Amino acid sequence: MFLAIASMPLLFVSDLTFINYKKSLEANPFSQLQDLTIFRADRIEAYFDGLKGHIEVSQGFYNIKRNLPVLTRLADDPGNPKFLDAKKMLDAQLQQMQSVSDLSDIMLVNPQGKVVYSIRPGHFLKDMSNGVDAEQKAFAEGKSRIYFSDVYFDKIEDNRFETLLTAPATDFNGAFIGVIAFEVDMTPVYKLLQNTTGLGNTGEVLIGKRAGNQVEYLNPLRHDPNAALKRKIDIGNEIGRPMQEAVQGRTGSGLSTDYRGKKVIAAWRYIPSLDWGLVAKIDTKEAFADVTNLRNLSIALLFIIIVLSGITAFSIAHSISEPIKQLSEGAAIIGSGNLDYKIGTIHKDEIGQLSRTFDKMTQDLKQTLASRDELNREIIERKQAQEELVRSNKDLEQFAYVASHDLQEPLRAVSGFVELLRRNLEKSLDEKTHEYMNFSIDGAKRMQSLINGLLEYSRIGTQGQKPQKVNSKEAFDDALARLQAAIQESGAKIAADDLPTVYFDDLQLTRLFQNLIGNAIKFRSDQTPQIHISAFRQDAGWRFAVRDNGIGIEPQYAERIFMIFQRLHTRKIYAGTGIGLSICKKIVERHGGKIWVESTPGRGSTFYFTVPDIEGA
Ligand code: ADP
């Protein structure tokens, strides 16, 4: 398809060039033939004009005027010295003229038609008035004017084509004394005509004459040497039209069919002085050989160009389509999921670049997928670990709950009985044993409070309420009520901003405030405790802050204090179990929030916790 479209302009241009060139080539032979007819006709006319000039000169010869009557008179007595003298005189002059004019003979004819003088002895005393038609007519016409006879074949003497040129001879007074006759050999004329220069292998020049309703060819033809005077065509016949035109006085050129029935191109013209027609012709096949050659050459060239451009187009198309095919096949393979496939073309063009980009893209995609798979695997692992953690936390909670719950009873019994023992034996015990007894009771009490703390810690998850709308101000107030004794004892000043409504387990919120405010009072410095509670909107939730002016916390302990049983002080300085903040942490995290502390040791601490807006988060 591409080739067909690409060849169209090529075909168009070559066709146009061919047509133009063909026209000029076709016009060429016609003008050449026309030139040839002009040239040959001129030469023939010049030849015969020359002969005519010679006969005119001879008409004025003294020699003829004087001697022709003598010869006429003594023709029957050729041995007469006078006859011989006269002949001798004439010989001297006319033989020279014969050789100059290349005539076959010069004859003088007496008024009766008898040849009384001839250079060639054979013509002597021949009776022209009784000879062949041409001779009779030449003699008859020559009596009154210069006349060219028809061409005739002299089979008696010379066995060749001849023509006669006759003219009247007169005496000194202008009286008719006979006829001067030049016998003209047609051979030089035929030679002139038969010269095939410029006529190739088939061309020729012909002369013809009208004879009644026919045309008679006057010269031997190239393809028919015996044509002269024998070959004739009827006027009106399809064959030999150029000659028919020429003998009828017309001049021209054109295509025609010649006497052989072959197509020819011809030029023709009429020679008025001889009343002849002249035709130059050449076979169309040969004349247009250049055109044919050109056409063949054009076709061959076109064929070569088409084949070459076909091969080029095919190889270009192949070099383009093959990588595209590879690319599309590769894309299909990669598309089916085989990311290890490489198109791997070495072409340096745009398609090659595209293929390499494609390969790189596949590589990147593979890596991306690999890292995605990695990520997915990590997520799944984390999820599993988280689930594991939740489950083990639950197990732990359960265990802590069960353990602390079940331990409570025996512990209560131990501490109850030790107390009873102490009361019963109070008076009989020595100081040392008394002290030991007190240690035991303290230990049991402390263990009890640790177990209670643990129990409370484990209950946060298992026995907590579902979060619901709760006014944090109320929780805060409840916490203060519970801390009343400590507040009074320490003289703490506690203030709160407007506190929001949040989704929370209300008891746990109270517990949260209670623990944080309780710590703020407990870990006070020398100054009167100043405690401030506030809440800010932050990230779709609330951020609470409990600020105090207590002893503060060293930054390295900021995380440790939220772990269970972790304390920074001995019981003697600050009482406590180290569970309070871990309970806070658990409560906050259970509601989807975070808890942390910011502090400057000696200046006070601020405990922050967040509460998301979403119910049950
Ligand atoms: P406890 O209060 O029973 O010691 P917590 O878990 O409540 O246990 O507190 C852990 C530790 O954190 C405390 O022992 C204390 O050292 C430190 N702490 C807690 N609150 C404050 C505070 N407001 N100021 C200074 N230190 C504090």
Image (spheres, helix red, strand yellow):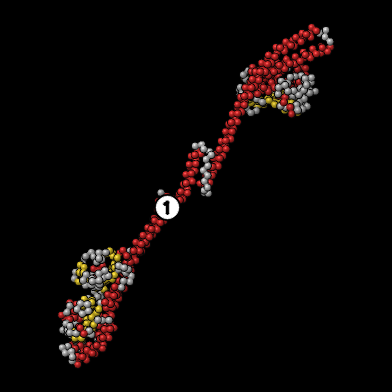
In the picture, measured across the screen, residue 89 lies left or right of residue 471, that is left
Quadrant in which residue 192 is drawn: bottom left
Residue lying at 21% horizontally and 91% vertically, measured from the top left? 84
Answer left or right for 519 relative to 349: right
In this rendered view, identify the residue nearer to me: 468 or 435: 435
**Occupied quadrant, residue 439:** top right
From the viewer's side, name the closer residue of 512 and 315. Answer: 315
Q: Residues within 10 Å of mark 1 (few under 14, many from 20)?
A: some
Q: Can residue 178 be seen?
A: no
Indicate if the residue with disc 1 has its beta carbon within 8 Å of ligand 1.
Answer: no
Could you tell me which residue is drawn at 40 percent across and 53 percent down? 8
**Image x and y of residue 454, in percent:** 69, 18
Quadrant for the C terminus, please. Answer: top right
Give residue 104's position: percent from left, percent from top: 24, 81
Look at label 1 and name its amino acid. Gly
Q: Check the image and report above or below for 233 versus 580.
A: below
At a point 16% along the width and 81% down the height, the residue shown is: 129
Q: Nearer the viewer, residue 549 or 95?
A: 95
Q: Nearer the viewer, residue 29 or 597?
A: 29
Q: Is residue 375 visible?
A: yes
Residue on which disc 1 sits: 310
Specify the quadrant of the image occupied by residue 153. bottom left
Judge from the rendering whether residue 506 lies leftward or rightward of residue 76; answer left or right.
Answer: right
Is disc 1 placed on a helix, strand or loop? helix
Residue 67 in picture, x, y percent from top left: 21, 89
| Vertical relation: 611 (above or below) 177 | above
Q: Residue at x 70, y 17 (%)?
A: 453
Total labels: the figure holds 1
Q: Residue furthest right?
A: 431
